[in-house]
Amino acid sequence: MDLIATLEAYLAGSANLRSAVADLSREQLIARPIPGRWSTLEVVCHLADTDANIAHRLKRVLSEDRPTFDRVQPDLMRAALAYQDRDIEEELACFDLGRRQIARILRASPVEVWERVGVIGDRGDRTVRQMVIGAIDHLAHHLKFIEEKRHALQNAEANP
């Protein structure tokens, strides 16, 4: 994927996430229609928090020489950061704003910055390009879970 297409896919993530949760009520957002799995709101909060973490990493990689980062621990974040009490619109806005800010920074930077490297826990070296593509893939991975929950909610409502 070339750099322009990568940035377009990265930016499209905001609309894709918003579309995935469109028309869900607060009750549907916090429901856990699949036992043992996160609610849709928890998934959206995870995406917003993870994207903010990726944005922070990208900024450090752009401004420092080979910074190192610990891996994110999603279950600890979910337990500590009040995911079920958060507001869906705020989470979507944070996700969108972070992506627009990073895209603006990358567009204003020389093309060479895409090859700058940060070191992430046990994953090792990751370029800016790999981090942006990783953010795109992370969202796609979780959009499948949101769709799965939406389908489970529809089945539960159709078969009470």
Image (cartoon, rainbow, N blue to C red):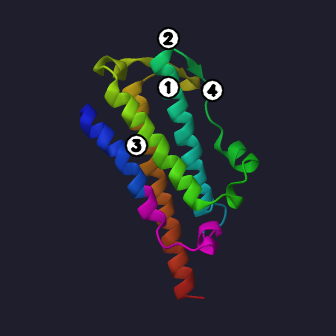
Query: Height in image: 148 above or below 91?
Result: below
Write down the residue under mark 4.
70
Give the position of the N terminus as an image quadrant.
top left
How many residues crowd mark 2 within 10 Å: few (<14), some (14–19), many (20+)?
few
Whichever of labels 3 and 2 marks the residue nearer the N terminus, that label is 2
Residue that badge 2 annotates: 65
Which residue matches tag 3? 136
Name the kind of residue labelled 4 in the image: Asp
Find residue 61 and report its horizontal and vertical position in percent.
Answer: 48, 20
Q: Amino acid at mark 1?
A: Lys
Q: Is residue 115 left or right of residue 92?
A: left
Q: Residue at x 37, y 34 (%)?
A: 104
Task: Residue at 55%, 76% (x, y): give it.
Answer: 153
Which is nearer the eye, 123 or 100?
100
Q: Which image quadrant is residue 40 in? A: bottom right
Asked whether 96 falls inside the magenta stretch, the response is no
Q: Residue at x 31, y 17 (%)?
A: 112
* Residue segment shown in magenta: 17-33
Tell me if I can see residue 1 in this picture. no
Residue 25, magenta (yes or no): yes
Eye-nearest disc, 2 or 1: 1
**Residue 79 percent across, percent down from the top left:** 74, 49
Residue at the disc numbered 1: 59
